[in-house]
Image: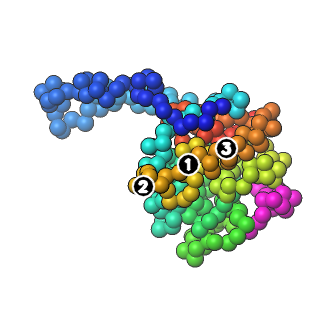
């Protein structure tokens, strides 16, 4: 599998060049007459009943998993180095209900689409940090009407802020201070949690260790997402597009993706990529590459 970040141009991706788009744009209002008071519901090319029907069709296609074996995937991504570095600018400034979130906008949308599709009974977050991620999952579940969805977050240490602990209590989030290397202990703690599960891995423990602890307890239809596996992910936190001279990448994500591919290849008979969500923004168009898996049997 290739290592380089995507160098695809607009032309190689089948997209019109900026010059072509500029030529196609009307130069004056007279060339595209539309009264200011008219929203264009019936006249716009993408609007109206035709546009709505198309959107509904696309949404239906996402609702059904399009599973692809990991062996049929490459590490190519429609998100290139420039875009990744720019996403990091927002990621390190992102908050939710006043809590530090440390998740980028594209990943958050992938999770939102997956939650709406899966309607999980349990969300298991691996890597609690300050607690902002667990609060986001819990409030997002509420917004989607997942009233019976439990959010459980695991970490080897308790670094949760007082503000997040307060929200944990209000939202019913459960914190478990555990070591994933204690697979038997983890299995005992999670065995009775209702399915389907959505597991969000953001602790950066070897994927082989993660799967040793979780795989036997997961069933068909459950999902696991490994974060930060795009090869342009910065090697250290707080690197972003504001200082590209010191932006280093490839080592951290490369090593993590190696472990993910190794662990999931060993379990290829039971796990596959759900490409309907993994490729929502184009091929591997996310800050995680080939890392959104569903259990198929």
Please indicate, yes or no, whether residue 236 appears anywhere in the rendered image. Answer: yes
Residue drawn at x 46%, y 26% as measured from the top left: 13
Where does residue 61 sit, x and y in percent of width and height? Answer: 56, 30
Residue appearing at x 69%, y 67% in the figure: 175
Local crowd at mark 2 within 10 Å, few (<14), some, or many (≥20)? few
> Looking at the image, which residue is at 60% across and 61% down?
134
Taking the image as shown, residue 20 lies to the left or right of residue 115, namely: left
Q: Is residue 87 visible?
A: no
* Between 249 and 86, the one nearer to me in the picture: 249
Q: Say above or below: 141 vs 82.
A: below
- Closer to viewer: mark 3 or mark 1: 1
State which quadrant residue 42 falls in: top left
Residue that carries the numbered disc 2 in the rendered image: 243
**Residue at the front extreme of this rendering:** 245
> Quadrant location of the C terminus?
top right
The residue indicated by pointer 3 is 257
Which element type, helix, strand or loop, lies under badge 3?
Answer: helix
Q: Which residues are magenta?
A: 177-196
CB atoms of marks 3 and 2 within 8 Å? no
Percent of width and height locating residue 151 = 66, 59
Q: Secondary structure at mark 1?
A: loop
Question: Which of the 4 image quarters holds residue 4?
Answer: top right
Nearer to the camera, 85 or 179: 85
């Amino acid at each position: 599998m290739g290592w380089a970040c995507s160098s695809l141009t607009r032309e190689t991706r089948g997209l019109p060049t900026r010059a072509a788009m500029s030529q196609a744009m009307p130069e004056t209002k007279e060339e595209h007459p539309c009264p200011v008071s008219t929203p264009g519901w019936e006249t716009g090319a993408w609007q109206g009943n035709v546009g709505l029907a198309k959107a509904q069709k696309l949404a239906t296609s996402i609702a059904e998993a399009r599973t692809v074996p990991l062996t049929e995937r490459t590490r190519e991504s429609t998100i290139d180095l420039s875009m990744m570095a720019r996403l990091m600018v927002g990621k390190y400034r992102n908050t939710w209900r006043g809590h530090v979130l440390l998740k980028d906008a594209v990943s958050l949308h992938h999770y939102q689409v997956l939650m709406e599709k899966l309607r999980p009974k349990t969300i298991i977050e691996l890597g609690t940090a300050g607690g902002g991620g667990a609060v986001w999952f819990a409030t997002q579940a509420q917004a989607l009407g997942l009233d019976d969805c439990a959010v459980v977050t695991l970490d080897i240490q308790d670094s949760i802020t007082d503000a997040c602990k307060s929200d944990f209590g209000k939202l019913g989030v459960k914190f478990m201070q555990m070591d994933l290397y204690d697979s038997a202990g983890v299995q005992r703690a999670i065995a009775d949690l209702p399915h389907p599960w959505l597991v969000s891995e953001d602790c950066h423990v070897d994927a082989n260790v993660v799967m040793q602890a979780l795989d036997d307890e997961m069933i068909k239809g459950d999902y696991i997402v490994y974060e930060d596996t795009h090869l342009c992910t910065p090697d250290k936190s707080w690197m972003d597009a504001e200082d590209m001279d010191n932006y280093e990448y490839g080592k951290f994500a490369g090593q993590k993706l190696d472990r993910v591919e190794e662990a999931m290849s060993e379990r290829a008979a039971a796990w596959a990529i759900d490409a309907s969500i993994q490729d929502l923004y184009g091929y591997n168009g996310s800050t995680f590459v080939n890392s959104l898996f569903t259990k198929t049997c």
